[in-house]
Amino acid sequence: MIRSEILREIAPILHDQLVVCNIGLPSQELHMIDDNAKNFYMLGTMGLSSSIGLGLALAQDKTVISIDGDGSVLTNLGTLPTIANNVADNYILMIIDNGSYGSTGDQPTYAGKKTKLENVAAACGCENVVTVQDVDAGKALQAAIDSKQMTIIVVKCDSGNIKLPVITMDPVVIRDRFMKAVAS
Amino acid sequence: MSIDKKIVDDLVANDVSFITTVPCKQLAGVIEEVDARPEIFHIPSNKEDEGMGLCAGAWMGGKRPAIIMQNTAIGVTINTLATLTQYYRMPLPMIISYRGELREPVACQVEMAVHTKALLNQLNIPTYHFHKESDADELDTILKYTFMCNKPVAILTDASFWGGYGDQ
């Protein structure tokens, strides 16, 4: 499975949760599959999906799911020790690990070579690190939500992209409706 | 009252309750005070752009954030300031140690100091420079201004403000 197929499969689970979605194609795909006020789309700032999600989870009680990619986590690798040392049991980081920088043309990442992000996360002190294959992403996500424990899920999948348009929604509109959904 | 305590009192009085910090010798007393206050969730970050991501999330979650960092971080965070904090119109007080100014003992610090105000100006970031201790009287007003306009705002605090570098 490729990332867009995984997002389509887990969309019904994501629908009821606050989601912070990574820049580029992941946000465009989620926007196309199930646009709603509980999705925060990143239009810039590669690497910060996990940080924004953690800050949000620490600030309020609702479950927050950050959807990130292996390339973006590598960009902001310092996020993993911060997550490990500031446990928010309403926080789930789902790393869709396809071993490539999808939005820029599928150049290989080091996570697709020798670096194992699940091992990095564990070495940083993250306590619940789950590694699954693409077909089990939904099951793992639902289990993490039900566990009410901070969880890092690394979903191994194929690289590959679908063609779709950029998000033209105004960033302040995305942010404003998201904040209203958070507060509701 | 110590200046460290006054700064943190102003943050608390303005309902700032989520503060991320990157270590700094000049701001060490402020960071210690932030860590000691029960009203504040203190989350050290490994890099300042990461910290700004944490602050963006915390603000969307209903908490008023702030970041404490050195001016070298302006070089690290320009993309984040432009494409996250400013683009989504979010408030962020940045209490910044302004290294490389008068009384600076480390020559390399001057290299970023000479760019600091120019970069902040280029980004249209409201910038305040604390040089004398009485300049901090404006902090309360600056914080109110920041959360009124939903912008990142820079508060540069130089070595003279902090009373120099001890024996240097």
Image (cartoon, coloured by chain):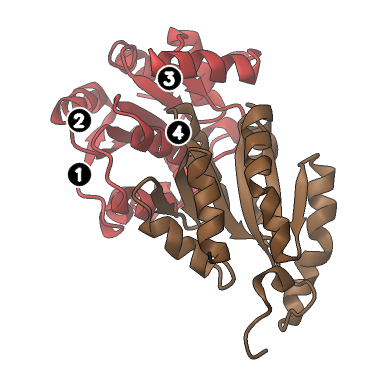
Chain colours: A red, B brown
How many numbered discs sit on the rendered protein? 4
Residue B63 numbered mark, or none: 4
- Asked if marks 3 and 1 fall on the same chain, the answer is yes
According to the image, label 3 marks what residue? A4
According to the image, label 2 marks what residue? A144
Q: Chain of mark 2?
A: A
- Foreground label between 2 and 3: 2
**Does residue B18 appear in the picture of this structure?**
yes
Distance (Cα) linking label 3 and label 4? 33 Å
Q: Chain of mark 3?
A: A
Characterize the local packing of mark 3: few (<14), some (14-19) or many (20 or more) Cα atoms within 10 angstroms. many
Kindly identify the amino acid type of the residue bearing the numbered disc 2: Ala
Kindly identify the amino acid type of the residue bearing the numbered disc 1: Asn
- Foreground label between 3 and 4: 4
Residue B102 numbered mark, or none: none
Q: Earlier in the sequence, mark 2 or mark 3?
A: 3
The location of residue A144, given as percent across then percent down, is 20, 30
The location of residue A82, given as percent across then percent down, is 38, 52
Distance (Cα) linking label 1 and label 2? 9 Å
According to the image, label 1 marks what residue? A128
